[in-house]
Amino acid sequence: MPSPPAAAVAADSDTDAHPAPGAPPDGLPTPRRYWSVAAIWLAMTMSVLDGAIANVALPTIARELNASAASSIWIVNAYQLAITVTLLPLAALGDRLGYRRVYMVGLAVFTLGSLGCALSQTLEELTAARILQGLGAGGIMSINSALVRFTYPKRLLGRGIGLNALVISVAAAIGPTVASAILTRGTWEWLFAINVPIGVLAIAIAARALPRTVGSARPFDWVSAVLNAVAFGFLILGAESVAREGLAAGLWKLAVGAVAAVILVRRELRLDAPLVPFDLLRIPIFGLSIATSVVSFAAQMTAFVGLPFYFQTVMGRSAVETGLLMTPWPLAVGVAAPLAGRLADRYRAGALGGVGLTVFAAGLFALAMMPQDASDLDIAWRMALCGLGFGFFQSPNNRAMVTSAPMHRSGAAGGALATARLLGQTAGAVTTAVFFHVAGTHATTTALATAGVLALFAALVSLSRLKLAPRPRPEPLDRPSDVAAGP
């Protein structure tokens, strides 16, 4: 008979198939929990840093590889696109094979891709290596939330998610600085080569410390995985083409993506555990949390894309000054996220998220009304206000998403969480590009005001969850085997 679709954390044995008798039922014991967290943080730091440092180094890489600015964009796009199209399939694969296995393979592929990037001699080689890196990062990001859920005991899960957000925020904040420091001392190849020893260390720790999970005997749905890749890939490429070159350039890509999406939805709605987690979206608290995440990340990316152009072209700041002025936002997220994570273990995510998003909206409106001759301090407090509000929303919202899903669908929940973030960021980037196409960089203030409206709407959606969850939701254990075990 097939094994049950549980994702139970098993013993530290050679197989993932059997939980240890009498093992602790709630999270990993210390010090193993700390080692598991170290492996998770190392992998996430590398994947986030590589998204940030490539942007900073793009002009240098393009010049040394004799590539045009337009073609060099694929160094960034190839990585992001590979992540986007693989998040949900790899999350589903984690539910089937066990989260640790998919995460370990993702780490290994990412490390191998980093080595390939460092050894690349042409733009084509570097783009191919970046795709390989993106596939590995997809394995890391899709499984990350599920591993956090099985690593921490239920009473500390919000804290764990908050600390995860802190690590991601710090990595995003220091990305430009790290890239500049490396390029000052060495060549661009070292931006990627530095990942290799860190990746090997992360693999060594993960092999011993990550929770082992029992997968499902359900076969992997390759047809849905291909349809998912075509739908997301062509829709995102089409939206970017429309924003950059006009409707005619991207219309056929949007059409291909839309057709694939319709076929995918019709197929997935008939399945019990679909690759696109429609079963989880039917859970009201999960669906509303996903909607809140998409809208809020769209607002965030609208500001992130528009502000650097505004600082440099309208306010006359240098590239270095722009980087410093952008830093208070992620640093404030790093301050607020752990605090909000602790509160999320005791108070309702709807209320915490509503407060955070209202503060976020206030910060966006303050930026929209900022005078063109604003001082650095005037800019910094507005950026910090946005970061505090966003960080205060993010951890409780992520906790609500993760805990509202059954344990055996933790991978699907984590994949949906990461996909919502990327979809929101893509929508925000495209929205800003449309504003720029219509009115130039002076339209940034209008884009920021639009982002503020989106954040207020997200706050209302967040508050609507109060009637669904009167207190922090306990972990919904499906059966006695769906529990975290010890070493």
Image: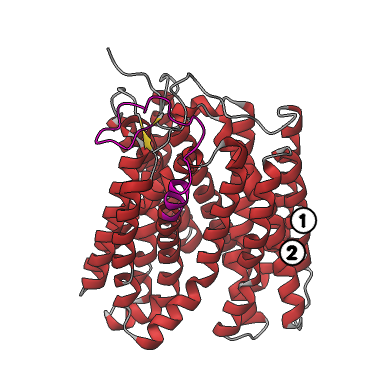
How crowded is the residue under tag 1: few (<14 C-alpha within 10 Å), some, or many (20+)? many
Residue 297 place in picture, x, y as percent? 60, 52
Residue 296 place in picture, x, y as percent? 64, 50
- Name the element at disc 2: helix
How crowded is the residue under tag 2: few (<14 C-alpha within 10 Å), some, or many (20+)? many
Residue 208 place in picture, x, y as percent? 33, 47
**Dividing the picture into quarters, in which one does residue 400 lie?**
top right
> Magenta stretch containing residue 263, yes or no?
no
What's the amino acid at mark 1? Val
Residue range in magenta is 10-38
> Which quarter of the rendering shows the N terminus?
top left
What's the amino acid at mark 2? Leu
Pick whichever of labels 2 and 1 is earlier in the sequence: 1
Say which of 347 and 280 sits in front: 347
Compared across the picture, whether 76 is left or right of 345 comes to left
* Residue closest to the far top: 1
Say which of 338 and 432 sits in front: 338
**Dividing the picture into quarters, in which one does residue 188 lie?**
bottom left
Q: Residue at x 40, y 44 (%)?
A: 87
Q: Main secondary structure of the magenta part?
A: loop
The reply to whether callout 2 and callout 1 are in contact (CB within 8 Å) is yes
